[in-house]
């Protein structure tokens, strides 16, 4: 490397190109070999003796007026090259690599953990996988047909009011069954699955659902469900009871009892709410179970023949064989809220904790 900057013999563009090319080459060499970023910076950008300052003194100041611009452009390019080299790994890595002090404590990276909600969701899914169920997923933006109509919620039926729906804008020109909305439950994936597959079917469907609910300690406009569907010949209500009793014991402990309370869902007949004996007071009655000894956990029932009929109608429209004749095929379905189950498992009283991103909350599940 030359310590001094030679005077320029000529200021025409080829001469300038040649002179700056030499300097650019010098920048490359010094940046590749120097293992001290600060020394490199001083050498080139130092305010008094930096090479760029010397170039400016030697060339820019003596340049004839018409050469100022082409010289200035090349000067700035050289400066950018130096600044880029300062950022570049070759220079940046050098001094660090040389300066590693192996006696210092290392940087610790806390391993990530599964979010408590996902953990519970996976636990539920795993219980059913062990029973031979497989997993299906469906879209969160759903059509009225899958979310409501095929599940036996007729248009304008009051049963729709229980699922305050967030609809997608600008859908008025479409036929009502094609209008898009945010799915209010995972049940539409039952329909999608039956249209796609013939029985027998054993499915769990985990996923996110959306409702126009105000957030409070137990509600969130976005939450999670796990749906289940089992369809075959000779599936009975006893199969439903046995399956869900097993699942509740697997999730909450073998001493938990279940009971089935008559309920209503448009897509199941008969329908039931499943309650488990209160895990906080073992059924004696406490504040958590409102002194009843029981906690309501999920909905379920036998698949309504009207649902099978809607599925087969759609299968035929799509050129498939009907496969869900209600005189031959029966099935049960269930749906549970993941937040609710996780809250009971861990004794969490505010649903908002799941979404707050507060590390003090999340770290408890590590
Ligand atoms: N989809 C219902 C809801 O979100 C839950 C449900 C109830 C699902 C009964 C089912 C079922 O599959 O059989 O409120």
Image (cartoon, helix red, strand yellow):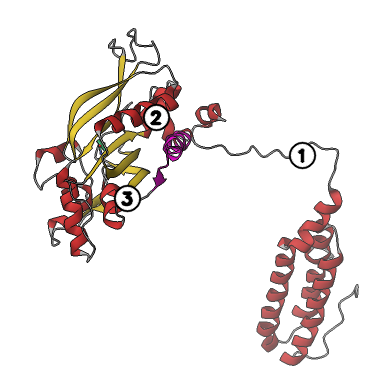
For the residue pair 345 and 304, the one nearer the viewer reads as 304
The response on whether ligand 1 sits within 8 Å of label 1 is no
Q: Is residue 28 left or right of residue 73?
A: right
Q: Secondary structure at mark 3?
A: loop
For the residue pair 223 and 229, the one nearer the viewer reads as 229
> Horizontal and vertical percent for residue 344?
39, 23
Counting residues from the N terminus, which is met first, the one under dot 1 or under dot 2? Answer: 1
Counting residues from the N terminus, which is met first, the one under dot 2 or under dot 3? Answer: 3
Please identify the quadrant where the N terminus is shown.
bottom right
Q: Secondary structure at mark 1?
A: loop
**Real-space CA distance between mark 1 and mark 2, rounded to the nearest whole angstrom:** 45 Å
**Real-space CA distance between mark 1 and mark 3, rounded to the nearest whole angstrom:** 43 Å
**Real-space CA distance between mark 2 and mark 3, rounded to the nearest whole angstrom:** 26 Å
> Horizontal and vertical percent for residue 159?
13, 38
Residue under pointer 3: 140
The residue depicted at 68 percent of the width and 86 percent of the height is 65
Name the magenta segment's main secondary structure. Answer: helix
Residue under pointer 2: 247
Find residue 87 and report its image quarter. bottom right
> Horizontal and vertical percent for residue 222?
33, 40
Residue range in magenta is 118-135
Report the residue that reaches farthest toward the top.
Answer: 284
For the residue pair 72 and 102, the one nearer the viewer reads as 102
- Would residue 57 be counted in the magenta stretch? no
The response on whether ligand 1 sits within 8 Å of label 3 is no
For marks 1 and 3, give the one nearer the viewer.
Answer: 3
């Amino acid at each position: 490397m030359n310590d001094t900057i030679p005077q320029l013999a000529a200021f025409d563009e080829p001469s300038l190109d040649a002179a700056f090319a030499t300097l650019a080459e010098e920048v490359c060499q010094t940046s590749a070999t120097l293992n001290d970023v600060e020394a490199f910076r001083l050498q080139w950008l130092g305010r008094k003796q930096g090479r760029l300052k010397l170039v400016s003194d030697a060339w820019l100041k003596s340049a004839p007026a018409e050469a100022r611009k082409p010289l200035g452009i090349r000067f700035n390019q050289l400066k950018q090259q130096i600044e880029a080299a300062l950022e570049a790994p070759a220079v940046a890595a050098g001094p660090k690599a040389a300066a590693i002090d192996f006696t210092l404590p290392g940087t610790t990276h806390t391993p990530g953990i599964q979010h408590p909600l996902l953990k519970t969701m996976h636990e539920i899914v795993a219980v059913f996988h062990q029973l031979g169920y497989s997993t299906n997923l469906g879209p969160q933006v759903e059509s009225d047909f899958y979310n409501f109509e095929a599940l036996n919620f007729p248009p304008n039926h009051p049963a729709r009011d229980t699922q305050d729906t967030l609809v997608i804008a600008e859908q008025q020109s479409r036929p009502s069954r094609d209008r898009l909305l945010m799915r209010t439950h995972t049940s539409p994936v039952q329909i999608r699955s039956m249209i796609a597959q013939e029985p027998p079917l054993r499915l769990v469907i985990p996923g996110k659902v959306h409702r126009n609910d105000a957030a409070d300690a137990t509600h969130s406009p976005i939450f999670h469900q796990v749906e289940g569907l089992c369809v075959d010949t000779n599936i009975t209500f006893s199969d439903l009871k046995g399956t869900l009793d097993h699942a509740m014991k697997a999730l909450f402990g073998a001493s938990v009892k279940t009971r089935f309370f008559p309920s209503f869902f448009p897509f199941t007949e008969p329908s039931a709410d499943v309650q488990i004996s209160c895990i906080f007071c073992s059924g004696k009655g406490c504040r958590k179970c409102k002194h009843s000894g029981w906690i309501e956990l999920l909905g379920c029932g036998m698949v309504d023949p009207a649902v099978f009929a809607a599925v087969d109608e759609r299968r035929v429209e799509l050129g498939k064989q009907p496969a869900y004749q209600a005189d031959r095929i029966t099935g049960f379905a269930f749906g549970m809220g993941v937040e609710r189950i996780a809250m009971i498992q861990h004794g969490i009283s505010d649903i908002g904790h799941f979404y707050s991103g507060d590390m003090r909350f999340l770290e408890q599940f590590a």
